[in-house]
Image: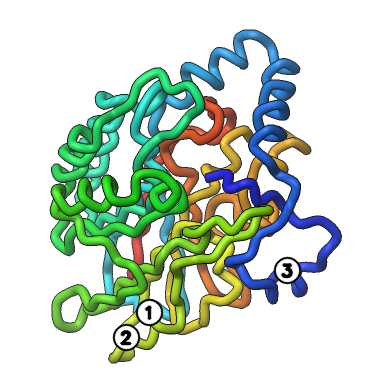
Amino acid sequence: MFPDDGALAGSSAAQRAEEPPTITTGRLTRRRVLFGAAGVLGLCSASTAVYAGAVEPEGLVVTRYAPALRGWPAERRLTITVIADLHAGGPDMRLPHVRHVVDTANVLHSDLIVLLGDYVARYEFPTERLPPEKWSAELARLTAPLGVWAILGNHDWWHHLVMIRSALADARIPVLENDAVPLGAAGQKFWLAGIGDQLAHPLGHHRYRGADDLPGTLAQIRTDDPVVLLVHEPDIFPRVPPRVALTLAGHTHGGQIRLPLVWPLFVPSKFGARYAYGHVVENDRHMIVSGGLGTSIIPARLGVPPEIVQVRLGA
């Protein structure tokens, strides 16, 4: 989250949709976020500030969606548990909290579990670093009939990439990087696709080169069965074709600090609040953006509690 790529100002929606999602510009810098957050919390009462820093980040909710998708046959039933932006580490995603996330996800008994990237917390002054063998051992306990699948996020690429790849491998969780795999029994088949991170390689001056290859990923799909696409950043959505029944994204943390007027400034997307959170429908194409679990830049949440998402498809 927060790759210093704030909302672009003064562009129409159509113009924004045509811009390459791997090049991001804007005014949301780390310093602006820190000072802005301090100002926001300063305006709040002391009790609200304590809640944002110590209470809400420790919570957990399950948010459920049952979208009616044109590209998904009604008789093809599927449940998906979505875990996004774990950011394991102190102060708000310590080992007991990670364990609680895994226990809650398993209790949902979904057919499929997907992890949408950003596995480790990184703060200027962390209160607790969680070794990879600790959080990966917890993720290894996740279980679902159709498996547990992962993609990588921008923080995974920017910090400790080799370590995170190794930790997921130790947990026996396959990582989809511009890959598509068929899943499901006969008559219930679908494709699960996952792309590389769109902000993988910082180029300086708020510009990035991605590791994503959406056309190459979709070219691997060899049947007419529906497609579920995993992406970390939702900004690629304008380029996702109708062939994809549902896109699942994270990265934004739902804005993390969600207050009127101020909230859009905290959404790390060049589209501002357009893809910040929840069920997005554009031209009959569907995307669900998770608010995620951990925090980034500042260890506080307000108005966007940590969440696990469960999606139910089919009648």
Q: Secondary structure at mark 2?
A: loop
- Give the quadrant of the C terminus: bottom left
The answer to whether the residues at label 1 and label 2 have Cβ atoms under 8 Å apart is yes
Q: How would you rate the neighbour count of disc 2 (Cα within 10 Å): few for under 14, some for 14-19, many for 20 or more?
A: some
The structure residue drawn at horizontal position 81% and vertical position 68%, both measured from the top left corner, is 12
Distance between mark 1 and mark 3 Cα atoms: 23 Å
The structure residue drawn at horizontal position 30% and vertical position 76%, both measured from the top left corner, is 180
As displayed, is residue 137 above or below residue 215?
above
Callout 2, which amino acid? Gln
As displayed, is residue 226 above or below residue 257?
below
> Can you tell which quarter of the image residue 68 is in?
bottom left
The structure residue drawn at horizontal position 51% and vertical position 82%, both measured from the top left corner, is 242
Asked if residue 273 can be seen in this view, the reply is no
The structure residue drawn at horizontal position 45% and vertical position 77%, both measured from the top left corner, is 214
Q: Secondary structure at mark 1?
A: helix
**Marker disc for residue 16:** 3
As displayed, is residue 35 above or below residue 67?
above
**Residue 13 spot, x, y in % from top left:** 76, 68
As displayed, is residue 2 above or below residue 297?
below
Q: How would you rate the neighbour count of disc 1 (Cα within 10 Å): few for under 14, some for 14-19, many for 20 or more?
A: many
Distance between mark 3 and mark 2 Cα atoms: 28 Å
**Residue 206 spot, x, y in % from top left:** 66, 53
The answer to whether the residues at label 3 and label 2 have Cβ atoms under 8 Å apart is no
Residue located beneath label 2 in the image: 220
**Marker disc for residue 217:** 1
Callout 3, which amino acid? Arg
**Marker disc for residue 168:** none
